[in-house]
Amino acid sequence: MSVNVISRAAWGAKPWNGTPNTVAISERTEFFVHYDGATPITRTGNSIPQAIEREHLANGWSGVGYNFVVDQAGNVYEGRGWNLQGAHCPNHNRSGIGVQVAVGGDQAPSEAALAATRALYDEACDRANRTLAKMGHKDGFATDCPGPKLYAWVKAGMPVSGGAPAPAPAPNPSALVLRRGDKGEAVSTLQALLNVKGLARLNVDGDFGPATEEAVKAAQRAVHVAVDGVWGPQTAAGVAAYSRLPIPTAVLGVGSSGQAVRDLQTWLNARGYGHLSVDGAYGPATKTAVIAAQHSLGVTADGVWGPKSAAAASR
């Protein structure tokens, strides 16, 4: 299936509110699937990306944060496209292509929508010259997105009816023991997981070599388990809990102190925005990490954490 993308001009996009950064396709390692949230979608046609654009502009973003939007008829709408940084998953807006399937709540995605999304995935892999990790939004961020139906589809390998047999689901790293010298799809899945959780920046090559071992050790130190460089159930459980930290909501800036700052520092570390001492003192290092987070989230990068930053992080 070839992908026919409806351009921003064709669906009536407004000019960018500040042009997003360019990303080389070679940087892409993940493909994230999203949905619209808790409410089923009744809009059709161009009104779908237009509604998303209004919401994202109101957040202070440059425009639609997804790279593409897919409706129930299988139409594909250009958002950030192939070569612009998205605003869809904190810490993965450069490495990940983000695609929203325009369903919400318990609404079932149509076969046309799934086929179009799978076609986008296949083209993304062709363009990047690698197999991208198949991810639901919740794999990179503590959220219910993309909902149970889309998430189950992603975890099943993104199959489409009438096409080739669906690939087997990727191995679940939480159930595996992996160590230096191991190779294969399980190692690729682990490498993608560490990248998605903000704990590493590995080449997803399926080779558990020195870099992957060091990344596992760094993850073990971050989640306070035995540091041996071997991935197993205890490390997997620690990483899973680490990535589910609540999003800080207090207004905090240089000079702030106390538990709220410690919570923010812990969250910034967990999301890969810094390697901060969790000391409860909002100093220059914490401000630098907040600015990095704000750039990634697509909000004003002023170094002050507040409601807009928290709202952007919750998507």
Image (tube, grey):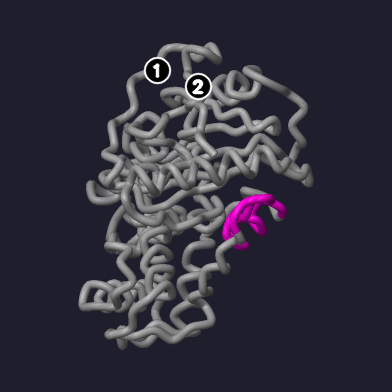
The correct choice, above or below, for 276 with respect to 235 in the image is above
The correct choice, above or below, for 193 with respect to 213 in the image is above
Q: Is residue 166 left or right of residue 73?
A: left
Q: Which residues are magenta?
A: 149-164
- Amino acid beneath label 1: Asn
Q: At numbered mark 2, what does the secondary structure look like: helix, strand or loop?
A: helix
The correct choice, above or below, for 103 with respect to 149 in the image is above
Label 2: few (<14), some (14–19) or many (≥20) C-alpha neighbours in 10 Å: some
- Amino acid beneath label 2: Leu
Q: Position of residue 102 (x, y in %)?
A: 66, 34
**Residue denoted by label 1:** 17
**Residue denoted by label 2:** 57
Q: Quadrant of the C terminus?
A: top right
Q: Position of residue 73 (x, y in %)?
A: 69, 30
Q: How many marks?
A: 2
Q: At numbered mark 1, what does the secondary structure look like: helix, strand or loop?
A: loop
Instruction: Give the quadrant of residue 288.
Output: top left
Q: Position of residue 13 (x, y in %)?
A: 50, 14
Tell me what residue is drawn at x 40 percent, y 49 percent.
Answer: 125
Q: Could you say which is closer to the camera, residue 275 or residue 33?
A: 33
Tell me what residue is drawn at x 41 percent, y 23 percent.
Answer: 62
Q: Could you say which is closer to the camera, residue 77 or residue 58?
A: 77
The correct choice, above or below, for 7 with respect to 112 in the image is above
Residue 10 visible somewhere in the drawing = yes
Q: Is residue 69 left or right of residue 85?
A: right
Q: Quadrant of the N terminus?
A: top right
For the residues bearing labels 1 and 2, Cβ distance under 8 angstroms:
yes
Q: Could you say which is closer to the camera, residue 223 or residue 91?
A: 91
